[in-house]
Amino acid sequence: MKKSIGNKAEGLEFLEQNGFQVPQFEVLDGKSTQDENIEQIVLNLSLPQGQWAVRSSSSVEDGLQHSNAGRFKTVLNVSNMELPSAVLEVKKSIRTHTDHDPESDYGIIVQNMIQPV
């Protein structure tokens, strides 16, 4: 059985696979990403220098019945050097939320930050 990376990440992957322009993103498996290895994991993503948004992706977000927007932490305008701490911050917001089932899978999205016009 395929591990879930959450509705938001699955939606981004669907859009990208179907030819839509989506800002560059990578998805980390939140549950199996060990906190003590986070710097190496982020480094292995080989992301270009830039500004990033670090976003949660859970099965209780972006669903057909409820969006639950803002349920978990999002960190915006993150530099490459700040990515490990931002990933940990988002991960902590998911793990400690009362609606999150500790047995469920989830993802953490690192996505190119697009500045509003």
Image (tube, rainbow, N blue to C red):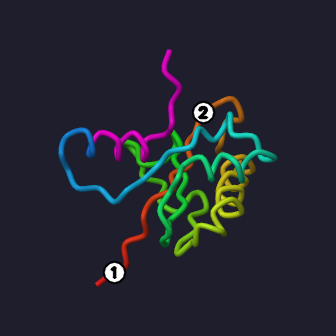
Residue 80: image tag: none
Relative image position of residue 39 (x, y in whole percent): 71, 53
Relative image position of residue 74 (x, y in whole percent): 56, 64
**Residue occupied by mark 2:** 105
In this figure, what is the number of numbered marks? 2
Relative image position of residue 32 (x, y in whole percent): 68, 34
Q: Residue furthest right?
A: 36
In this view, the residue in front, 64 or 47, is 47
Please tell me whether residue 65 is drawn above or below residue 113 in the rendered image. above
Magenta region: which residues? 1-14
Left or right of 29: which side holds 112?
A: left
The image quarter containing residue 114 is: bottom left
Residue 116: image tag: 1
Please tell me whether residue 71 is drawn above or below residue 40 in the rendered image. below
Residue depicted at x 72% and y 49%: 38
Q: Residues within 10 Å of mark 2 (few under 14, many from 20)?
A: some
Relative image position of residue 12 (x, y in whole percent): 35, 47
Please tell me whether residue 28 is drawn above or below residue 75 in the rendered image. above
32 drawn magenta? no
Q: Residue furthest left?
A: 19
Residue depicted at x 60% and y 57%: 72
Q: CA distance from mark 1 to mark 2?
A: 31 Å
In this view, the residue in front, 26 or 49, is 49
10 drawn magenta? yes
The image quarter containing residue 29 is: top right
**Front disc: 1 or 2:** 1
SS of the residue under disc 1 = loop
Residue depicted at x 29% and y 39%: 14
Disc 2 residue type?
A: Asp
Residue depicted at x 48% and y 71%: 50
Disc 1 residue type?
A: Pro
Q: Residue furthest bottom?
A: 117
